[in-house]
């Protein structure tokens, strides 16, 4: 009986230590250091928004700017632009020009006013930006389009100071409309970005369709460390 008590107490101690270790390792959230505002600017190459239903909008370039701020990234992206020159976004497999509301022809402005840092994986440790896209209204010829929701995009490097960080958004296959990243960890809890809260697109006021984004770009700034 005494031996059984010892075994039980030992097991309880091991479980308690494991729980403590887990909370210590994964309780902290990723963040940028320094935690004060750090301005960044950058560019990217081709980017594609695609829906599960086969619709697509492709932009050859973009320019971006924003802030790294503690656990967040605030991003303004002008798709279809390089420097001050419009390079045009296209829809319907490149047949028509797509333009954001109030923008120069072929340019679409996307605002991410809330881009929260989360863990994308725990082993190896990876970090992503859970970006909430402010609803975007645009037209592709006579077709009206609205895009809204959230998208998970990987950010690197992690754990070392750098003046350049890469943000990469992926689909399971090119133009599939199926986002590659949907699982993340926040506060040590595993979560899944559901279809209802993920990136969604509506064409001519129709039903919103599940959508994916395929693009990668850089944000250049003074030296910042992304701590995982």
Image (cartoon, helix red, strand yellow):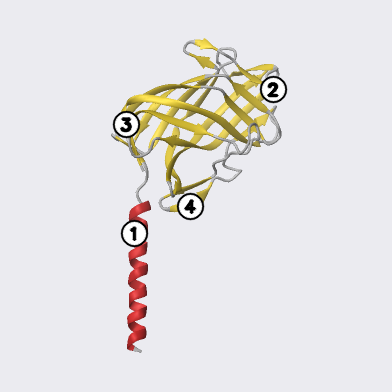
Q: Secondary structure at mark 2?
A: loop
In the foreground, 169 or 196: 169
Q: Secondary structure at mark 1?
A: helix
- Mark 4 surroundings: few (<14), some (14-19) or many (≥20) residues within 10 A: few
The outermost residue toward the top is: 85
* Earlier residue among tags 1 and 4: 1
Left or right: where 12 falls relative to 193: left
Whether residue 195 is situated above or below residue 34 in the rendered picture: below
Task: State the mark number for residue 93.
Answer: 2
Task: State the mark number for residue 21.
Answer: 1
Label 2 to label 3, Cα distance in Å?
A: 39 Å
**Residue drawn at point x = 34 percent, y = 83 percent:** 5
- Mark 3 surroundings: few (<14), some (14-19) or many (≥20) residues within 10 A: some
- Mark 1 surroundings: few (<14), some (14-19) or many (≥20) residues within 10 A: few
Q: How many marks?
A: 4
Residue 202 lies, in percent from the top left, at 66, 31
Q: Which residue is mark 3?
A: 224
Label 3 to label 1, Cα distance in Å?
A: 28 Å
């Amino acid at each position: 009986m005494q031996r059984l008590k010892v075994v039980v107490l030992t097991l309880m101690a091991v479980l308690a230590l494991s729980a403590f270790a887990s909370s210590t390792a994964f309780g902290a959230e990723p963040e940028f250091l320094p935690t004060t505002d750090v301005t960044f600017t950058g560019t990217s190459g081709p980017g594609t928004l695609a829906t599960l239903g086969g619709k697509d909008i492709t932009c050859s370039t973009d320019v971006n700017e924003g802030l790294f701020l503690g656990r967040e990234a605030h991003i303004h992206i002008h798709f279809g632009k390089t420097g001050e020159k419009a390079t045009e976004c296209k829809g319907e497999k490149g047949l028509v020009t797509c333009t954001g509301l109030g923008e120069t022809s072929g340019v679409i402005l996307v605002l991410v006013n809330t881009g929260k840092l989360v863990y994308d994986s725990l082993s190896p440790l990876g970090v992503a930006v859970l970006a909430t896209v402010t609803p975007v209204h645009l037209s592709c010829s006579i077709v009206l389009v609205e895009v809204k929701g959230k998208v998970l995009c990987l950010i690197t490097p992690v754990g070392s100071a750098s003046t350049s960080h890469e943000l990469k958004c992926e689909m399971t296959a090119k133009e599939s409309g199926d986002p590659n990243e949907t699982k993340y960890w926040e506060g040590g809890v595993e979560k899944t970005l559901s279809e209802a809260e993920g990136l969604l697109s509506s064409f001519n006021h129709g039903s919103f369709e599940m959508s994916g984004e395929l693009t990668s770009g850089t944000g250049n700034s003074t030296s910042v460390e992304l701590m995982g």
